[in-house]
């Protein structure tokens, strides 16, 4: 389609000269140029309205995050799990607030664009009246959408502040206010659309799927027909009803899913004795595997086993807590590579929240060779300061740095809730 045909198609004007004189032709040319320019503005305005509609449709469907199910009952869960859930809830609330903030920005932009379009149409004396009405309706709709988006943003900011306040609150406040904060954040999410399905009788027909136009056969007891005799006794009907009854299916409960929330491990004391002279009670839990580590540069020398394996346990002796670490080094030259665990050597614990705690070894250990003469066992006893117990009980362990005689080495912890569980067991027993 050529340019003049394109303008004629959209503007509905027939461009034919009206005079033969040069002056008339010049005036007519200027008039046609002005008409064509105004028509182009009209085309651009229609394109902008279409683009604005696409942006508005996109702004109505933001991708909201899915909230985790609130654990219940809260009192049965340890504090570190509740605080981890509160921290995740605060992060999700911030994401929802950012979504509403972007939606409010888009609504404001759409309202400004619609206002500019309406102002341009009102300034254009050749603009159609229907076009101005359409632009005025679009501007009104955008203003209402902007007000709704700003109100929702204000609610999201309040919910975010409420969830963030839990991170600085004490234990009692966290257990008390977590359900309220969760309900407030959940109220920000849009409700899913419910699709109403037609009844099955309206889909398959009243008689049959093959031929719904046929009339159903008469039923006994209707239209003067005699009622049929019962084929079975009431007792037989009752038994048949019990036999054919559908099994009761319990609805799915995420809080009871053992894959999502495994049951707590039992507290098993390996040592529980009391000194006959001092009367002090000593308790120690069963050892658990804390980590496995092989340096990437040594992986070729250990294709079927790990270089370092650490077993750990926590012991309590009259209010003094000791962390026992047993390192199995699968290397015949372990003493040359690692040396020993010197007395007062450090063990630095790094938690998932970034905080670090330093423990010191009570006694030196030169290492004991294994039965296969290809490994060595090093035992370390690290005293836990009483002020660190609460921190360890509600935090998850991330990394471990051990100071050997030849230098220090960092390890990634796999059993991250080891300290929290074992300290909780010792405090209960």
Image: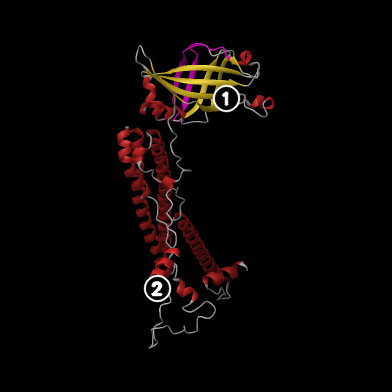
Residue at position x 62%, y 24% in the image:
307
Would you identify the image quadrant in which residue 299 lies? top right
Residue 215: x and y in percent read: 47, 84
Residue 295 included in the magenta stretch of the image:
no
- Residue at disc 1, secondary structure: strand
**177 w.r.t. 342: above or below:** below
| Real-space Cα separation, disc 2 to disc 1, in angstroms | 72 Å
The residue to which callout 1 is attached is 309
Give the labeled residue for mark 2: 233
Q: Residue at x 36, y 19 (%)?
A: 319
Look at the image and tell me in which quarter the N terminus lies: bottom right
Q: Which residues are magenta?
A: 343-367
The single residue placed furthest to the right in the displayed view is 300
Q: Is residue 138 visible?
A: yes
Q: Earlier in the sequence, mark 2 or mark 1?
A: 2
Queried whether the magenta region covers residue 359, the answer comes back as: yes
Residue 300, percent from left and from top = 69, 27
Q: Quadrant of residue 251?
A: bottom left
Can the viewer see residue 23?
no
């Amino acid at each position: 389609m050529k340019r003049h045909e394109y303008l004629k198609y959209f503007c509905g004007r027939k461009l034919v000269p009206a005079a033969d004189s040069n002056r008339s032709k010049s005036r007519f040319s200027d008039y046609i140029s002005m008409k064509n320019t105004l028509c182009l503005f009209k085309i651009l305005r229609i394109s902008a309205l279409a683009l604005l509609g696409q942006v508005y449709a996109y702004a109505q469907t933001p991708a909201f995050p899915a909230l985790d199910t609130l654990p219940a009952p809260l009192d049965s869960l340890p504090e570190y799990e509740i605080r981890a859930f509160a921290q995740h809830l605060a992060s999700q609330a911030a994401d929802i607030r950012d979504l509403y903030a972007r939606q409010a920005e888009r609504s404001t932009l759409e309202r400004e664009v619609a206002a500019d379009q309406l102002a341009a149409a009102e300034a254009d004396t050749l603009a159609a009246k229907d076009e101005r009405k359409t632009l005025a309706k679009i501007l009104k709709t955008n203003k209402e959408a902007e007000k709704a988006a700003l109100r929702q943003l204000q609610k999201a900011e309040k919910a975010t502040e409420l969830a963030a306040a839990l991170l600085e609150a004490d234990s009692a406040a966290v257990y008390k206010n977590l359900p309220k904060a969760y309900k407030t954040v959940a109220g920000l999410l849009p409700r899913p659309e419910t699709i109403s399905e037609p009844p099955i009788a309206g889909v398959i027909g009243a008689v049959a799927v093959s031929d719904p136009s046929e009339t159903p056969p008469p039923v006994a007891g209707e239209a003067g027909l005699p009622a049929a005799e019962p084929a079975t006794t009431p007792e037989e009907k009752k038994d048949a009803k019990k036999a054919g009854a559908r099994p009761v299916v319990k609805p799915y409960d995420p809080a009871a899913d053992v894959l999502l929330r495994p049951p707590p491990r039992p507290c098993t004391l390996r040592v529980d004795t009391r000194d006959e002279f001092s009367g002090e009670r000593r308790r120690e839990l069963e050892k658990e595997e804390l980590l496995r580590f092989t340096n990437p540069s040594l992986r070729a020398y250990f294709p079927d086993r790990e270089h370092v394996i650490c077993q750990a346990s926590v012991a309590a002796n009259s209010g003094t807590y000791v962390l026992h670490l047993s390192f199995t080094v699968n290397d015949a030259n372990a003493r040359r590579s690692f040396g020993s665990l010197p007395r007062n050597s450090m063990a630095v614990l790094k938690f998932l929240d970034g905080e670090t705690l330093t423990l010191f070894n009570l006694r030196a250990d030169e290492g004991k060779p294994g039965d296969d003469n290809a490994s060595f066992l090093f035992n370390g006893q690290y005293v836990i300061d009483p002020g660190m117990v609460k921190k360890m009980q509600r935090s998850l362990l991330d990394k471990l740095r051990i100071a050997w005689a030849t230098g220090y080495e960092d390890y990634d912890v796999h059993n991250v809730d080891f300290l929290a569980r074992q300290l909780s067991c010792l405090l209960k027993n």
